[in-house]
Amino acid sequence: MNTPDAAQLARLANQFRMEGNVLDIAPFGSGHINDTYRVNTDAADSYLLQRINHHVFRDVPALMNNMELVTHHLKQKYRQLNEKDPDSRVLTLIGHESGKSFHEDAEGCFWRMFVLLPHTRSYDIVETPQQAREGGRAFGQFQRLLSDLDATRIHEVLPHFHHIGKRLERLDEAVAKNAFDRVRSVTAELAFVAARKDRMQTIQHMAAEGLLPLRITHNDTKFNNVLLDGNDRFQCVIDLDTVMPGYVACDFGDAIRSIINRAAEDEADVERIKLNIPLFEAYAEGYFEQAHHFLTSHETDSLFAGVLLLPYMQTVRFLTDFVEGDHYYKIHHAQHNLQRTRAQLRLVEELEKHEPELRVILQRIAAKYQKN
Ligand code: GN1
Ligand code: MG
């Protein structure tokens, strides 16, 4: 996909029904999949113009249908809760002049536009327990407000997205092909993954036994997908591309993956990857505050499995992309996926080291809400 120039971007932006005239357009955010641009205008609002990666999201109309349903449902819920300004709590899509919520250009690329929420910010690395607690409240409330949306109306846009068995099969295939002759440089990482294969099946097994309900989950609960306001209170959950039926433990685990790590997701110096356990506790507090209303006891029991599984799954995914020649995630240098693999692998090790302590914290918080 070519990088469009400023004039092309402005032409695209002008096809959406935004207010005002374009002043400037610049790349925005740190996502690994889509391309995002901030559009400043001479009107009150700024906007985000986004090119959806259609190599990852093969069925963009289905994806956008999900997004329309989910944002509509959430806004209705906030209205029922007498929220003053539901548009500040939920993403707002700006329609295209065609009447649709997205546009397909002559090259077959897909574009959409959102209102940019002013006075909000997101963090790649969490700094305070207050922020972590708000993250927990954000994703807990997100799941809660979507719990009465009919899940059969939501398309599974990325089938088996958090199915570890399928992810491991894909890695095996990539290794067997070894198309880029990279397997010999990752034997230690492959051994690490293989040694934990069986242990990481807990959620899949519980689901197969019928113990875990499929709910509408976010499936990309990195902390930087929560917008906080000027007082570090959560305002809005963003990045709704992967909202699909899923298990709450995966959302919990993916959020913890980004919150508990004192270093970046792709930290080059793995010695810097250490756990910030007070942030784990704060996130869990915030999450249970919202989620205890609907969580079953089996779901509560499954949460810790998600904490180990999601960084493990991310290890497998980055490693697979490295072996396959870096076609899925955007990379910023040649070894980037390998660096990410090693950082996530170290995070799994750290979590394993502290497992008993983390389990006790989680049980204590869960028990508190069970009594109430
Ligand atoms: C991708 O694009 P971004 O950064 O929101 C990925 C997530 C991963 C994440 C790792 C559709 O999310 O699943 O957890 O990178 N999204 C997709 O940082 O694969
Ligand atoms: Mg995403």
Image (spheres, rainbow, N blue to C red):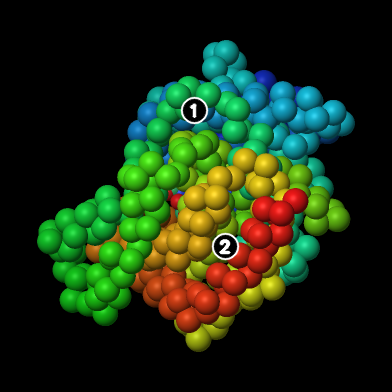
Placement of 180 over or under 119, stated as above or below: below
Name the residue type under label 1. Answer: Ala
Whether residue 223 sits left or right of residue 31 in the image: it is: right
Counting from the top left corner in percent of width and height, residue 192 is at 30, 75
Q: Residue furthest bottom?
A: 271
Secondary structure beneath label 2: helix
Placement of 24 over or under 225, stated as above or below: above
Q: Residue at x 19, y 60 (%)?
A: 172
Q: Residue at x 50, y 75 (%)?
A: 355
Whether residue 57 sits left or right of residue 277 in the image: it is: left
Residue linked to disc 2: 256
| Mark 1 Cβ inside 8 Å of ligand 1 | no
Name the residue type under label 2. Answer: Ile
The reply to whether residue 224 is visible in this rendering is: yes
Residue linked to disc 1: 151
Q: Residue furthest front?
A: 371
Secondary structure beneath label 1: helix
Quarter of the image where one finds residue 231: bottom right
* Front-lying residue, 329 or 221: 221
Counting from the top left corner in percent of width and height, residue 12 is at 56, 29
Q: Residue at x 74, y 67 (%)?
A: 129
Counting from the top left corner in percent of width and height, residue 106 is at 40, 25
* Front-lying residue, 99 or 198: 198
Label for residue 180? none
* Front-lying residue, 77 or 36: 77
Q: Earlier in the sequence, mark 1 or mark 2?
A: 1
Q: Residue at x 48, y 22 (%)?
A: 153
The reply to whether residue 36 is visible in this rendering is: no
